Amino acid sequence: MPPFDDDIVWSDPVDSDIEAAAAAIQSGRWTDIFPSSIDQIEWVDDAWTGDQADHAKLLKFWREEKSASTSGALTSDRIDPITLRTILPHTMLLDVEAKGFDARYRVYGTGIANNAGKDWTGSLVSEMNRSTKTGLALFYRACYRAVFRQARPLYTHHQSPPWLRVKAWKRLIIPVHDKTGQTISKFLVCNVPVEARNLSSPEWLEMHKRMIQ
């Protein structure tokens, strides 16, 4: 993989930026929008398998719930922590905000928090972005908006900034509808860390600086 592209000047994405990037994801033109640290963005269909066991478990849950539902969708009342217990350390549950232009972390798995340097439970994705200030802000926001628009699962593989304890993340985003099955109200995400690394003292200091703002 090429080095993490952290040379992009930090900016807080506005809705028009997010919508344009979400449309690029939808059409497959995302390489024109995002930095080289984004390795893969792929819509997930019924034939998709991936290479992560936790993703396979989440997909099995989603497909079974979708098939059993009269609305043909996974609804919020069917999310069962007991069924998902083996993947909970790598699981996030987000409440949709602003029609998918933002989202709030309701559950932030311990395995993710340990590698991300902070438990972001209760924070908006936009608030996390404003604290960490990396070129990934638009990527995060646009992926959620794209899933909200398309009501389809999305897989991504992206590299971490050099001040995090893993080299990359493989993420599966599942749309969750409200009880009526009409509106997407949540995102159920399995975010798997890839290849741990040891941080130098300056990298530790940089991580803590970005997390405490």
Image (cartoon, rainbow, N blue to C red):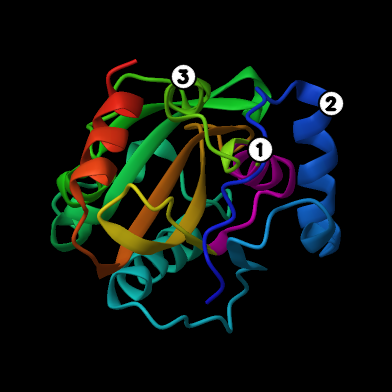
For the point 80% across and 31% down, the residue is 17
The extreme front residue here reads: 202
Circle 2 Cα neighbour tier, 10 Å, few/some/many (<14 / 14–19 / ≥20):
few
Q: Secondary structure at mark 3?
A: helix
Amino acid type of the residue that numbered disc 3 sits on in the rendered structure: Glu
Q: Secondary structure at mark 2?
A: helix
Compared across the picture, whether 169 is left or right of 192 comes to right
For the point 80% across and 51% down, the residue is 33
Compared across the picture, whether 28 is left or right of 182 comes to right
Question: Alpha carbon of mark 1 to alpha carbon of mark 2: how far?
Answer: 11 Å
Question: What is the magenta segment's predominant secondary structure?
Answer: helix
Amino acid type of the residue that numbered disc 2 sits on in the rendered structure: Ser
Q: Where is residue 30 shown, x and y percent of the image? A: 78, 58
Q: Where is residue 47, by image quadrant?
A: bottom right
Residue matched to label 2: 16
Which region of the structure is painted magenta? 139-156
Circle 1 Cα neighbour tier, 10 Å, few/some/many (<14 / 14–19 / ≥20):
many
Amino acid type of the residue that numbered disc 1 sits on in the rendered structure: Leu
Q: Where is residue 178 shown, x and y percent of the image? A: 50, 32
Q: Is residue 146 magenta?
A: yes
Residue matched to label 3: 127
Q: Secondary structure at mark 1?
A: helix
Q: Which quadrant would the C terminus be assigned to in this image? A: top left
Q: Is residue 179 magenta?
A: no
Residue matched to label 1: 138
Tell which circle, 1 or 2, labels the residue nearer the N-terminal end: 2
